[in-house]
Image (tube, rainbow, N blue to C red):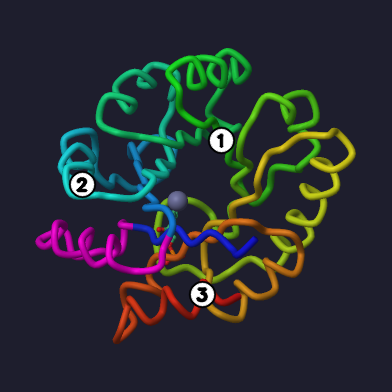
Amino acid sequence: MSVIISPSLLSCDFANIQRDVEMLNNSSCDWLHIDVMDGVFVPNISFGLPVIEAMNRHAKKTMDVHLMIQNPGDYIDAFHKVGADILTVHYEACTHLHRTIQQIKEKGMKAGVALNPHTPVDVLKEIILDIDLVLIMSVNPGFGGQKFIQNALQKVKRTAELIKSSGSSAIIEVDGGVNLETGAALVQHGAHALVAGSFVFNSENPTQTIADLKQL
Ligand code: DX5
Ligand code: ZN
């Protein structure tokens, strides 16, 4: 199976969201990665529900929503209503992670759990059979354009081992500092899906850049 590419709209031109979403519709990407930041869980604020609803009006691909917010469990219905297909919450932001995952799945969405760079993969042991996706952060969440943290490669490998030994069907997505070089290494270590923001949107030809990533 070819690698899933999920360009991050955090790096799009917010004055031309429709144009950029249509570019992604016509590209070989699989998902649209949507980063929600609340200024509390991470030191940055991105965009919220009305903007996602507007993106969804034009989007023809899977809406892959990454919540970098405190108490994500309070907003599951709201993100479902604006079109999220995959809803990923941070392990570090959930006291009752199991309940939150069940609530996401009850709405018919795929449920993901994201791990910050310092959070060990082992914390997923008791939840791995319940989730559809593990999001390994290869930067500290909050900003696009940061440098890839090399340790993410070993975390991807450990996640792949956990998935295999448990019999889980979760897929592994990686987010932060992805380019052709880090992307290739991630795929080699077992990543199934790659998020790329600045590498796609700062390139001269984003459609071609996506096609290049898709070849990894
Ligand atoms: C960071 C976000 C990422 C971000 C990645 O907190 O979760 O999705 O857009 O940006 P790049 O690909 O530029 O590192
Ligand atoms: Zn993200």
Give the quadrant of residue 131: top right
Residue 86 to residue 196: above or below:
above
6 in the magenta segment: no
Helix, strand or loop at label 1? It is strand
Residue type for callout 2: Met
Check disc 3 and report the residue beneath it: 213
Q: Position of residue 120 (x, y in %)?
A: 76, 43
27 in the magenta segment: yes
Name which of mark 3 and mark 1 comes first in the sequence. Answer: 1
Q: Is mark 2 within 8 Å of ligand 1?
A: no
Q: Position of residue 31 (x, y in %)?
A: 41, 53
Name which of mark 2 and mark 1 comes first in the sequence. Answer: 2
Check disc 2 and report the residue beneath it: 55
Which residues make up the magenta segment?
9-29
In which quadrant is the C terminus drawn? bottom right
Helix, strand or loop at label 2? It is helix
Image position of 196 (left or right of 185): left
Residue type for callout 1: Gly
Helix, strand or loop at label 3? It is helix
Check disc 1 and report the residue beneath it: 112
In this rendered view, identify the residue nearer to me: 116 or 99. Answer: 99
Figure label count: 3
Query: Which residue is at 48% across, 80% downward?
Result: 212
Residue type for callout 3: Leu
Classify 10 Å Cα crowding around label 1: few (below 14), some (14-19), many (20 and above).
many
Query: Which residue is at 48% across, 51% downward?
Result: 141
In which quadrant is the N terminus drawn? bottom right
Classify 10 Å Cα crowding around label 2: few (below 14), some (14-19), many (20 and above).
many
Query: Which residue is at 16% across, 35% downward?
Result: 50
Q: Position of residue 101 (x, y in %)?
A: 56, 21
